[in-house]
């Protein structure tokens, strides 16, 4: 745990460049408790450790076993075993479920995204064509996610490392202040330059320290349950075809004459 204590102090002073009090607020602990973490007098709880991991985008294993001051942040992000733990819902067959973040609850998710109890309390769904990966559905609210309007859910595929983000691809970013849906313009040393799908908005930088989670955009579902796929129209056409086939089958059954006894 001495390594963890050293890492916490180094990351706070050199990466976030903030005070113990401000960082303690982000981690939902008291300043006195956080001070004891850095002084190696008290070990943080699992929940707090997960929040620290998410905050810096550094895995728990790295935090506990590697003296981070000896490496650059970029080198750490590229390590193959630098993975951030993610609470997920799995059914009795082992299939990952797609958790649904409710509307008007973005701040609740930001406080509970690393809490297995909170994740287990969420409603969920399954889609047969989304099996390989970890997916989650986020609500589009206000004007932060053009062209999507209120009533749309954006499904994202979890990105484990900043190093896996690709320029010109679209992501849903979970920030300290809420959710945003943006395309990546540029990956900088300490930030992402992002742009909106609405050209009215100018590009801007988001510091890594403000990013809690990154989800690569996969699908969008409206209130009417229409499937919107901005990258593969074939999936949408498949669903419409199945829907029409079911209607035709229902009509045939309704007009089918009774069989002789």
Image: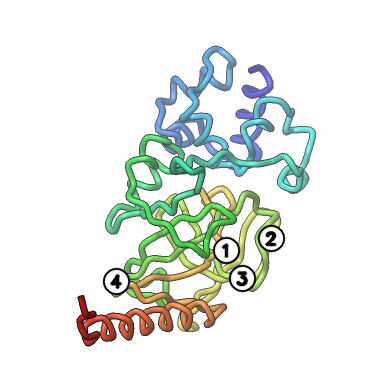
Give the spatial CA distance, label 3 vs label 1: 16 Å
* Badge 3 vs badge 1, beta-carbon distance below 8 Å: no
Could you say which disc has been placed on residue 205 in the image? 1
- Residue beneath the point at 40% across and 56% down: 178
Q: Nearer the viewer, mark 3 or mark 1?
A: 3
Could you say which disc has been placed on residue 223 in the image? 4
Give the spatial CA distance, label 4 vs label 2: 37 Å
Residue 12 lies in quadrant: top right
- Within-10-Å neighbours for mark 1: few <14, some 14–19, many 20+: some
Task: Tell me how many marks there are.
Answer: 4
Residue 22 location (% of width, % of height): 45, 36
Taking depth in this image into account, of 93 and 117 the one nearest to the observer is 93
- Work out which quarter of the rendered image holds the C terminus and state it: bottom left
- Work out which quarter of the rendered image holds the N terminus and state it: top right
Q: With 77 as the anchor, is 182 left or right in this view? A: left
Could you say which disc has been placed on residue 169 in the image? 3
Q: Which residue is farthest front?
A: 261
Secondary structure category for the residue under label 4: loop
Secondary structure category for the residue under label 2: loop
Residue 239 location (% of width, % of height): 43, 77
- Within-10-Å neighbours for mark 4: few <14, some 14–19, many 20+: few
**Vertical arrangement, residue 69 with respect to residue 253, above or below:** above
- Within-10-Å neighbours for mark 3: few <14, some 14–19, many 20+: few
Give the spatial CA distance, label 4 vs label 1: 32 Å
């Amino acid at each position: 745990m001495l390594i963890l204590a050293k890492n916490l102090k180094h990351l706070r002073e050199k990466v976030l460049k903030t005070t113990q009090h401000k960082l303690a607020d982000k981690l939902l602990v008291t300043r006195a408790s956080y001070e004891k973490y850095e002084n190696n007098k008290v070990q943080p709880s699992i929940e707090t450790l997960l929040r620290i991991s998410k905050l810096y985008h550094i895995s728990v294993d790295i935090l506990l076993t590697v003296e981070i001051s000896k490496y650059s942040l970029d080198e750490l992000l590229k390590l193959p075993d630098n993975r951030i733990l993610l609470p997920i819902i799995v059914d009795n067959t082992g299939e990952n479920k797609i958790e649904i973040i409710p509307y008007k609850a973005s701040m609740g998710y930001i406080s509970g995204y690393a809490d297995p109890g909170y994740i287990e309390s969420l409603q969920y769904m399954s889609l047969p064509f989304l099996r390989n990966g970890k997916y989650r559905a986020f609500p589009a609210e206000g004007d932060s996610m053009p062209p999507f309007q209120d009533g749309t859910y954006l499904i994202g595929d979890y990105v484990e490392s900043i190093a896996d983000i690709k320029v010109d691809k679209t992501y849903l970013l979970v920030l300290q202040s809420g959710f945003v849906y943006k395309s990546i313009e540029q990956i900088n040393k300490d930030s992402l330059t992002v742009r909106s799908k609405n050209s009215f908005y100018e590009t801007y930088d988001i510091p890594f320290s403000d990013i809690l989670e990154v989800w690569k955009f996969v699908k969008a579902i409206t209130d009417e349950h229409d499937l919107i796929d901005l990258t593969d129209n074939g999936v949408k056409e498949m669903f419409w075809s199945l829907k029409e086939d079911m209607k035709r089958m229902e009509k045939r059954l309704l007009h089918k004459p009774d069989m002789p006894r």
